[in-house]
Each structure stands twice: as C-alpha cells, then as structure tokens.
Amino acid sequence: MDYSRTGGPQKAGNNVPRHKEHNAKGTEKNPFGKNATKAALLERMKAAAAAKKQA
C-alpha cells in the first residue's frame, strides 16, 4: 500500500505571504538592480538632520 497517497490533499502554497508589500523588490517603486549609492544615502541623512534641526 502506498501511504503517501492516503489522506487529504496537501495545502498548496504554505509558504507564501498573505499580501503583497507596497515596496517589494521587483515592483514599480523598487525595481531590481536599483541600489542607492552611499553618497545618496548620506545626502538624504543630512537633509533629514537639517530639517529636524530647523523644526
């Protein structure tokens, strides 16, 4: 007897997320292969610090 064939069907896709992330890799907002440079990161951090300092 083949015991692997007994029982109900297996759940399909046990390991899939319940929803899509708004900024998931490969989407329009976050395409593959687009990595921010360190210079751009420092620029954003400095701008955020300046904005926080003024507020």
Image (spheres, helix red, strand yellow):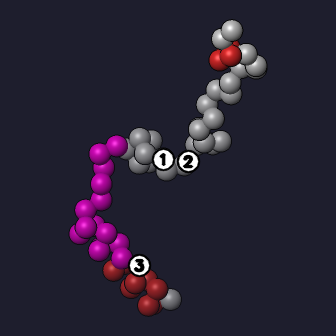
Residue 48 got which mark? 3
Q: Nearer the viewer, residue 14 or 3?
A: 3
Mark 3 and mark 2 residues within 8 Å of each other at the beta carbon: no
Residue 44 got which mark? none
Q: Residue at x 68, y 24 (%)?
A: 10
Q: Amino acid at mark 3?
A: Ala
* Residue furthest top as drawn: 1
Mark 3 surroundings within 10 Å by alpha-carbon count, few (fewer than 14), some (14 through 19), many (20 or more): few
From the viewer's perspective, tell me whether residue 29 is left or right of residue 4.
left
User: In what element is the residue under mark 2?
Assistant: loop
Instruction: Give the CA distance from mark 2 to mark 1.
Output: 5 Å
Quarter of the figure with the N terminus: top right
Residue 28 appears anywhere in the view: no
User: In what element is the residue under mark 1?
Assistant: loop
Q: Which residue is mark 1?
A: 24
Please state the horizontal and vertical placement of residue 48, each as a whole percent of the image. 41, 78
Please state the horizontal and vertical placement of residue 9, each as a whole percent of the image. 71, 20
User: In what element is the residue under mark 3?
Assistant: helix
Which-is-in-front pick, marks 3 and 2? 2
Which-is-in-front pick, marks 1 and 3? 1
Q: Which residue is mark 2?
A: 21
Residue 12 appears anywhere in the view: yes
Please state the horizontal and vertical placement of residue 54, each as a whole percent of the image. 45, 90
Q: Nearer the viewer, residue 30 or 5?
A: 5
Q: Is residue 26 above or below residue 6?
A: below
Instruction: Give the CA distance from mark 1 to mark 3.
Output: 24 Å
Q: Is residue 24 above or below residue 5?
A: below
* Residue furthest right as drawn: 8
User: Which is more N-terminal, label 2 or label 3?
Assistant: 2
What segment carries the magenta color? 32-45
* Residue furthest front as drawn: 1
Q: Nearer the viewer, residue 2 or 42?
A: 2
